Amino acid sequence: MVKERFPHYFECLRHYPHKQHAKLAHQFFWAKQRESGRPLFMLKHWVLDVRSDHAIITERRFYLNHSLDSLQVVIGCLPHRDSTLVILLNQAFTEKIDVPVGKSIAKKIGYHEVEKNIRPMFENLRTALKL
């Protein structure tokens, strides 16, 4: 659906930085958080496509640690009848861990990140839309 309905966004996600579109906003910044009592550093890349009829927000996190390479979270808000359909896609990537136990750890970290950071955003969005 994304490829057909939002081709510029799809191309940007697949081929960044080689394919960009003028209407998409990009932001980069460094972030630091604590995970299991240790500092965790990451580079964040936001890709934003916010218009009157839809909003697609992607956050890519590139980690500087040994357990997870990157995390990508995509949030889409689309009109649906008299309300808004909100979609969440979360993908964790790792190349360093290629055994079943390692993959389960990477997934757990990815799910934990979504639960801790993304869920509050959805709760705030739901509260705001009830107004």
Image: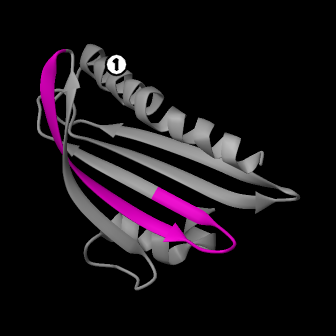
- The residue drawn where x is 52% and y is 41% is 121
Q: Is residue 94 left or right of residue 12?
A: left
The amino acid type of the residue labelled 1 equals: Ser
Image color mode: one colour
Q: Point out residue 125 in the picture as x, y percentages from the top left corner.
A: 62, 45
The verdict on residue 39 being magenta is: yes
CA neighbours of label 1 inside 10 A, class few (<14), some (14 to 19), many (20+): few
Where is residue 123, by image quadrant?
top right
The magenta span reads: 37-57
**Along the line of sight, which residue is nearer the eye, 121 or 74?**
121
**Along the line of sight, which residue is nearer the eye, 83 or 102?**
83
Residue corresponding to mark 1 = 104
Q: Point out residue 81 in the picture as x, y percentages from the top left corner.
A: 88, 59
The residue sitting at the bottom extreme is 22
Q: Is residue 125 left or right of residue 12?
A: right
Q: Point out residue 63 in the picture as x, y percentages from the top left corner.
A: 18, 40
Above or below: residue 15 compared with residue 96 = below
- The residue drawn where x is 24% and y is 35% is 94
Q: Quadrant of the N terminus?
A: bottom right
Q: Secondary structure at mark 1?
A: helix
Residue 98 can be seen in this image: no
Q: Main secondary structure of the magenta part?
A: strand
